[in-house]
Each structure stands twice: as structure tokens, then as C-alpha cells.
Image (cartoon, rainbow, N blue to C red):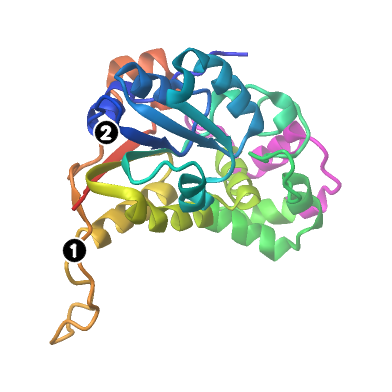
């Protein structure tokens, strides 16, 4: 298994303004790389991950930090409840690293990779009932096309869905990858199955819905001056994050032509990053998986 390399690690810790005994929630714990950096600077961490294997790996990695590292196997859509149960709020910072962990990508049996043969699962939480196999083999053609178009932004979604239905049953990741690749064709360095696999994975794990739910809760647990740091890896996530931060940094969110403000909305964040922060060329060379990372930062006011 290839080692997990945390993305933008120095930029993340600097953006969080980690202080000794400050409280920080790592909502996407993964292998614990970002949490280790926070702990190294003296912070206290509540690490959350929906993947039980990731929590086990991180627990081993962070064991030397003792009770400054509290790790929970749960979904970040339960953020407020978790913080309350752990007596860990208010907090000084919240981090989301929304990319897939290399722990998942490099494990063929998890079914995330289109380059290694494995079962069609794609579940962050192995106990999830919905799997990629169910979507691929049981969902109607028009629903598969909708998923691929909406979550993958794939122009050939209808043709891919038709090919999937025509080739049922599909049992492995490489079978699905081959079917999609024949429809899309090979152009450039991006694998033709990338968007379809992304779309199915997002649907299986309800990723966008969970992010939206968690972002609403962040406002309630951050102290004034606390930082929200989010790393995203594709346009749907980044657009969602950008829209949230932009809306929460405005005093009024009424439609432009509304003569008098009726929304009663007040800014709760100020934007720290006007433009996205991206990895340096040196980081991308060492860790090619970081190339599409985009980091945005906001501060609670």
C-alpha cells in the first residue's frame, strides 16, 4: 500500500493558526496526516472519519499524542452532535479535506479504482447498504445517466448509461471501466472512466448532501476568530464551498433588485482567501494526487 501524503499540509496548519491547547476538528481524518501536523504544533484534535479502517490507521499513527487526539468513527454530517458528546466545543478551527484517501484508492477490494480489479463497492463506510454495484446493475438507465451527468459532469452520460445497461450484469471495477472507456475514448492524460467513477462514488456516499449538512453546523461550533479550512478536489465540491463562504460573508443575501432588505441575514464569516490556494509545482511532483486540490479559508466573525 502506498503511503498517504497529506495535501497542502503547511498551508493548512498556517491557515488554521494552530495554537497550544487550541481545539481543532479534523472532519476527514484519513490516515491522520493533517491531524499529526496540528498536534505537533500543540493543538488538540477531534478527528472524525466515516471509514473505520482510516480511524484504525490514524489511531496507531497518533497514539503518542495521548488524550490530545480524540478519534471518532462517524460521519461529519453529525458534527455538532459529536462535538457535544465529546465536550469539544466551541473550537478554534475546522478542517475538511474532501479528497479520497490513498488508503481507499490503493485498496482494490474497496472498489474505488478503475485501474485495479475489485468489486463494485465504493463505500467510505463498508456497512453502507447502497453500493456501486446496485447503482450499475439495478438503477434505471435514465437515473444512471442523471447521476453521471450531475455528479460527474460527463457530456456522454446518456451513451454511458445505455452501454452500462446493455452490458449487465457488471461485477468488477475493470469491467465497468472498460465499458465506459469504449464510449468516451482516450483523450489526453485523464482516464476516460474518471468522471463516471467519481459520479457513482459521490452518489453512493451522498457526499454533497453530507458536506452541505456539515457546513451549516460549522457556524455553531467555531469561536469568533476561529478558522474554517476546506480542501476540495473537483468543481462540484469547490463550487459548493465557494458559494457557502461567499453567502456567509455577506450582510444581505436578498435578490439584487429587492428594494429593502428582508432576509435578516448577517455575515458570520470573512473570507481569508480571495482566490483558491493550490499546491506548488514541487508538491505536485512529489504527490501527483494533489494536482487538483483547491483550498479555501474563512474566519468566524
What label does residue 27 carry, if any?
none
Circle 2: element type: helix
Q: Residue 179 vs residue 20: left or right?
A: right
Q: Residue at x 68, y 65 (%)?
A: 142
The alpha-carbon separation of the residues under discs 2 and 1 comes to 22 Å
Can see residue 20? yes
Task: Name the residue carrying label 2.
Answer: 16
Q: Looking at the picture, how far across and down is residue 128, in whole percent?
A: 72, 46
Task: Name the residue carrying label 1.
Answer: 250
Of 226 and 236, nearer the camera is 226
Q: In this view, does 205 lie above or below 21?
A: below
Q: Residue at x 72, y 38 (%)?
A: 126
Q: Which residue is drawn at 64% across and 59% down?
A: 145
Of 134 and 159, nearer the camera is 134
Q: In which quarter of the image is residue 115?
A: top right
Q: Magenta stretch: residue 172 in it?
A: yes
Q: Looking at the picture, how far across and down is residue 268, in whole percent?
A: 23, 58
Residue most extreme to the right: 169
Q: Magenta stretch: residue 170 in it?
A: yes
Mark 1 or mark 2, which is nearer the start of the sequence?
Answer: 2
Q: Looking at the picture, how far across and down is residue 19, in whole percent?
A: 24, 27
Q: What stretch is highlighted in magenta?
A: 164-191
Q: Residue at x 52, y 28 (%)?
A: 30
Circle 1: element type: loop
Q: In this view, does 60 lie above or below 244?
A: above
Q: Residue 2 vs residue 273: left or right?
A: right
Amino acid at each position: 500500500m502506498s503511503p498517504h501524503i497529506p495535501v497542502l499540509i503547511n498551508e493548512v496548519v498556517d491557515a488554521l493558526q494552530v495554537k497550544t491547547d487550541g481545539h481543532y476538528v479534523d472532519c476527514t481524518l484519513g490516515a491522520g496526516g493533517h491531524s499529526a501536523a496540528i498536534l505537533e504544533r500543540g493543538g488538540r484534535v477531534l478527528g472524525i472519519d466515516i471509514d473505520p479502517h482510516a480511524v484504525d490507521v490514524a489511531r496507531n499513527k497518533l497514539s503518542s499524542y495521548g488524550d490530545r487526539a480524540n478519534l471518532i468513527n462517524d460521519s461529519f454530517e453529525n458534527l455538532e452532535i459529536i462535538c457535544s458528546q465529546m465536550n469539544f466545543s466551541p473550537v478554534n478551527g475546522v478542517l475538511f479535506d474532501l479528497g479520497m484517501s490513498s488508503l481507499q484508492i490503493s485498496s482494490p477490494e474497496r472498489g474505488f479504482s478503475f485501474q485495479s480489479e475489485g468489486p463494485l463497492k465504493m463505500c467510505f463506510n463498508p456497512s453502507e447498504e447502497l453500493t456501486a454495484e446496485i447503482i450499475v446493475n439495478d438503477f434505471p438507465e435514465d437515473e444512471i445517466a442523471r447521476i453521471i451527468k450531475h455528479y460527474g459532469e460527463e457530456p456522454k452520460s446518456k451513451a454511458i448509461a445505455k452501454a452500462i445497461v446493455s452490458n449487465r450484469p457488471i461485477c468488477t471495477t475493470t469491467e465497468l471501466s472498460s465499458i465506459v472507456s469504449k464510449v468516451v475514448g482516450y483523450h489526453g492524460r485523464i482516464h476516460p472512466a474518471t468522471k463516471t467513477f467519481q459520479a457513482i462514488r459521490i452518489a453512493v456516499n451522498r457526499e454533497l448532501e453530507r458536506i452541505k449538512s456539515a457546513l451549516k453546523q460549522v457556524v455553531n461550533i467555531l469561536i469568533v476568530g476561529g478558522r474554517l479550512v476546506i480542501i476540495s478536489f473537483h468543481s462540484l465540491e469547490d463550487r459548493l464551498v465557494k458559494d457557502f463562504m461567499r453567502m456567509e460573508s455577506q450582510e444581505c443575501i436578498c435578490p439584487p433588485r429587492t428594494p429593502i432588505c428582508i432576509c435578516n441575514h448577517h455575515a458570520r464569516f470573512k473570507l481569508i482567501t480571495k482566490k483558491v490556494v493550490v499546491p506548488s509545482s514541487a508538491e505536485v511532483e512529489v504527490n501527483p494526487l494533489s494536482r487538483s486540490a483547491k483550498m479555501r479559508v474563512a474566519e468566524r466573525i
